Image (spheres, helix red, strand yellow):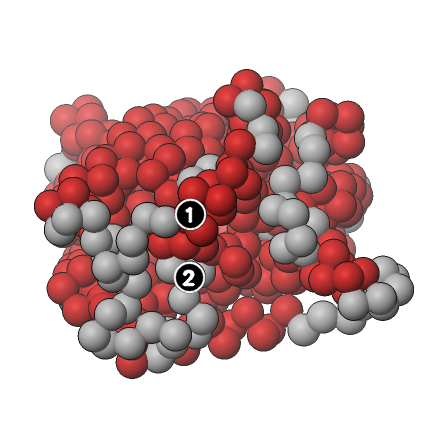
Amino acid sequence: MATEESPLLGEVVDIAVLKHEEVYNRFTPAQKRTITALISLAGLVPFFVSGTFIPSIPQIAKDLDTTGSVINVAVSLSIFTSSFGSLIWATYSSYYGRKPIYLTSIAIEALGSLGVATAKSVPHLLAWRVMQAFGASSGLSVGVGVIGDIYKLEERGTASGIFFAAVLLGAALAPLIGGITAHYYSWRSMQYGLCGFAIVCWVCTLLLQPETSQPGARGVDKARAEGKKAGWVWLNPLNSLALMRSPNVLFLAIEGALVLLTDIALIVPIAFTLGKQYNITNEALLGALVIPQGVGNFIGAPLSGALSDRMVIRWRKKRGDKWVPEDRLRATMWGAGLLVPCSILFSGLTTQYIKGTVGLVLNLVFFFMNGIGVDFVLSPSGAYVVDILHDRSAEVTAASMCFRGLVVSTSVVFLLPAIERFGVAATDGALAVAAWIGFGLLWCLIKYGDRLRAWVDVGFTTLKDN
């Protein structure tokens, strides 16, 4: 148990630590790269499910004889579903292992995509979007769990950064691909494509991906060791939410939600902000506007991951080999305090007050800034929660994602009405203030992280367990 006097500090590298590190030598570097590539492929799915849909909203609304605001509910509903879906997949991946969960969830996503492609009414569209989002929701939470399975503490930030960089390539490509497909073919063609992509992911996972759960760590392994039958077990995925009692986990989840909200606020209403101000109606061009943000994600994730590993090593050395988990979060400061809030603030002001080519170009610069800033917060944060709750890495990741998803999905419903009533500058300004509040939470976590861990101990892991 962690205490205020010695929460995760002062552990001496001993035989137990060295023995635990042998767990990470089960796979060769080449195998680890292959596994990372496979989980990144699966991690692309949720971003393609959401990103390809957004540029098609006006076309879908016209096709189903409704409005953009109504179709926007499908975006909110899919985020909401993904939040709870990730909890379910993460909980069962801890019990049955990572590979069976990937195979099941990807199959559900393929079926959901097929249903969305054939939807003839708004209720049918919403129902199939729920199934599609539920299947796709395993990609990030289980993927982060796999990273924790195969990479040790000092390598985890870099590996997480590479994973998020590959995954967030979907954030860069999805709106463009979705827009081009919708413009030159139809939005339904994109959904058929997602079904095919999911099938390819399923086959690759079946044939190439090994089970990565650490020996004896799965719930089914523990049940067998106790002489129980390894059949189906009903688990309560909401138990993972109990981890949110920890201020350390809660503060990061709040900050992550506020940061993601700036990202969503730039992308989701883009047809009604940049599209309206700069007279862009072509779905392909609307999708292309998101590319700078995706490129920023792609660049920011590996940089921030590697920087967070460097922070861990540097500060641990300064303290005479004492490990303080919050040192990893020092890599988030520039992104949380400067890039994220300033990018959303300046984008809102530019969109409302600067017309023409100059305004559009400035917005693309701010989209790029936002992409880098978001990853400078999320990538080290993802590695941090794995550090402090390694045995429940997928579950704590899913709990954080669930919280973020609930905040974002609720906010998305009010985003477009707020822009229509108060203007894009005022709406984005309020989001910038919220992002600075999140920065304050991060600062408190770095400064008082040990006391917060001692305040509510949810079973934190130590250096020996990492």
Question: Who comes first in sequence, dot 2 or dot 1?
Answer: 1
Which labelled disc corresponds to residue 461? 2
Out of 137 and 360, give the one closest to the viewer: 137
Q: Residue at x 84, y 66 (%)?
A: 227
The mark tally for this picture is 2
Q: Residue at x 54, y 27 (%)?
A: 32
Q: Is residue 413 visible?
A: no
Position of 132 compared to 67: left or right? right
Q: Residue at x 17, y 69 (%)?
A: 448
Q: Position of residue 423 (x, y in %)?
A: 23, 57
Pointer 1 residue? 15
Q: Amino acid at mark 1?
A: Ile
Quarter where residue 363 is shown: top left
Q: Which element carries disc 2, helix, strand or loop?
A: loop
Q: Viewed as shown, does residue 147 lie left or right of 324?
A: right
**Front in this rendered view, residue 366 or 304:** 304
